[in-house]
């Protein structure tokens, strides 16, 4: 099992879209995917269109110690495609952020251990440093950052990377969690605006690694290609709670995720014709 957290310190910059795009692409390849919704806004749960029985959400993992096997017990299958199982999120988990939870950070990791999934994706909250993101990082092999081509997205990556660095430095639970790259979504799909180009340049400069001018910068991290194009079909699909690949105009976005999944999950690389 390979577990990846999708992170940013800012809201509305594409974390959930990235989680959904990757989950659906992998499921289309026959990979068994688990999605854990750690965002108190529970958007990925809504988008994947699962019906959550009262109280049966990720809060049941984070709030108690007896969690062995809990992810499999709580998971619901998305009607989108066979192979996407979701541990749903809930507003209730926001209340857990502040409470002193002894060993709380370990519960999610323990709850997903043994879950019959090839790949687990964790959609994380914007808030950094708290129990939720610590639980995600403790449970993950890798972190992917999501961003849009603007200042908000750029600083969201910056502050999330600072949090990951701090986690790796201070937490004995999972110091080897690896940063994989930055996925940029909502790239203007016709002629890129000057703002978008500037934001991309700044993002690449921020993440170029230590330089003589900035010796304390974090390790170099790539902005993955292709950039995910902005398409209205993504928003329409979300409103309709379906996958954008079902719309002709969403195909470009689906193709971008296909390429990204090939790079980040090479063990599940698609062979020609397999994904449709
Ligand atoms: N490639 C795209 N084309 C068009 N719209 C997009 C694309 N990617 C993301 N969006 C839209 O941008 C908005 C923010 O995306 P998303 O919800 O994935 O961000 P988020 O970081 O998860 O936000 P939140 O803080 O609410 O969890 C959504 O309305 C989404 O539909
Ligand atoms: Mg989200």
Image (cartoon, rainbow, N blue to C red):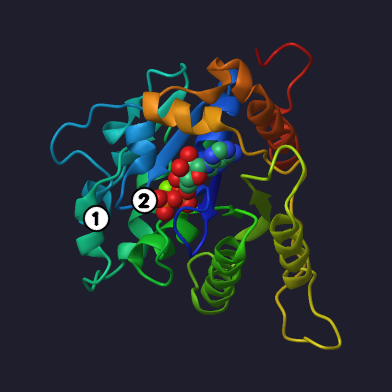
Q: Is residue 140 above or below residue 268?
A: below
Residue 189 lies left or right of residue 80; in this view the side is right
Query: Can you tell which mark lies on residue 118?
Result: none
Is disc 2 surrounded by few (<14), some (14 to 19) or many (20+) residues within 10 Å? many
Residue 222 lies left or right of residue 97; in this view the side is right
Residue 257 rendering spot, x and y as whole percentages: 66, 33
Residue at 40% x, 28% y is 85
Determine which quarter of the picture holds residue 101: bottom left
Residue at 74% x, 11% y is 273
Residue at 45% x, 34% y is 34
Residue 96 visible in the current orientation: yes
Q: Tell me, yes or no, whether the two marked residues, 2 and 1, touch with CB atoms within 8 Å.
A: yes
Residue placed furthest toward the right: 212
Residue designated by label 2: 38
Number of numbered discs visible in the structure rendering: 2
Q: Secondary structure at mark 1?
A: helix
Q: Is residue 271 above or below residue 176?
A: above
Q: Secondary structure at mark 2?
A: loop
Q: Earlier in the sequence, mark 2 or mark 1?
A: 2
Q: Nearer the viewer, residue 239 or 206?
A: 239
Is disc 1 surrounded by few (<14), some (14 to 19) or many (20+) residues within 10 Å? many
Residue at 65% x, 49% y is 183
Residue 8 rendering spot, x and y as whole percentages: 52, 60
Residue designated by label 1: 93
């Amino acid at each position: 099992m390979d577990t990846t957290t999708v992170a940013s310190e800012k809201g509305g910059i594409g974390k959930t879209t990235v989680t959904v795009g990757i989950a659906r692409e992998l499921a289309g390849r026959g990979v068994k995917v688990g999605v854990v919704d750690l965002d108190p806004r529970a958007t990925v749960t809504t988008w994947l269109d699962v019906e959550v029985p009262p109280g049966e959400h990720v809060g049941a993992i984070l709030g108690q110690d007896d969690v062995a096997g809990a992810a499999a017990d709580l998971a619901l299958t998305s009607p989108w495609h066979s192979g996407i199982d979701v541990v749903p999120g809930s507003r209730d988990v926001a209340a857990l952020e502040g409470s002193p939870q002894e060993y709380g950070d370990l519960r999610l990791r323990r709850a997903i251990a043994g879950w019959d999934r090839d790949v687990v994706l964790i959609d994380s909250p914007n808030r950094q440093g708290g129990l939720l993101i610590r639980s995600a990082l403790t449970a993950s092999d890798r972190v992917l950052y999501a961003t849009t081509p603007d200042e908000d997205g750029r600083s969201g990556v910056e502050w999330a990377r600072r949090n990951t660095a701090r986690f790796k430095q201070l937490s004995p639970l999972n110091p080897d969690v690896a940063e994989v790259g930055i996925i940029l979504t909502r790239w203007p799909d016709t002629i890129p605006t000057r703002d978008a180009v500037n934001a991309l340049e700044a993002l690449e400069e921020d993440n170029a690694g230590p330089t003589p001018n900035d010796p304390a910068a974090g390790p170099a991290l790539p902005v993955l290609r292709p950039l995910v194009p902005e398409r209205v079909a993504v928003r329409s699909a979300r409103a309709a709670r379906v996958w954008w690949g079902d719309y002709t105009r969403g195909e470009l976005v689906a193709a971008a995720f296909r390429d990204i999944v090939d790079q980040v999950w090479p063990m599940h690389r698609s062979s020609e014709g397999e994904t449709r």
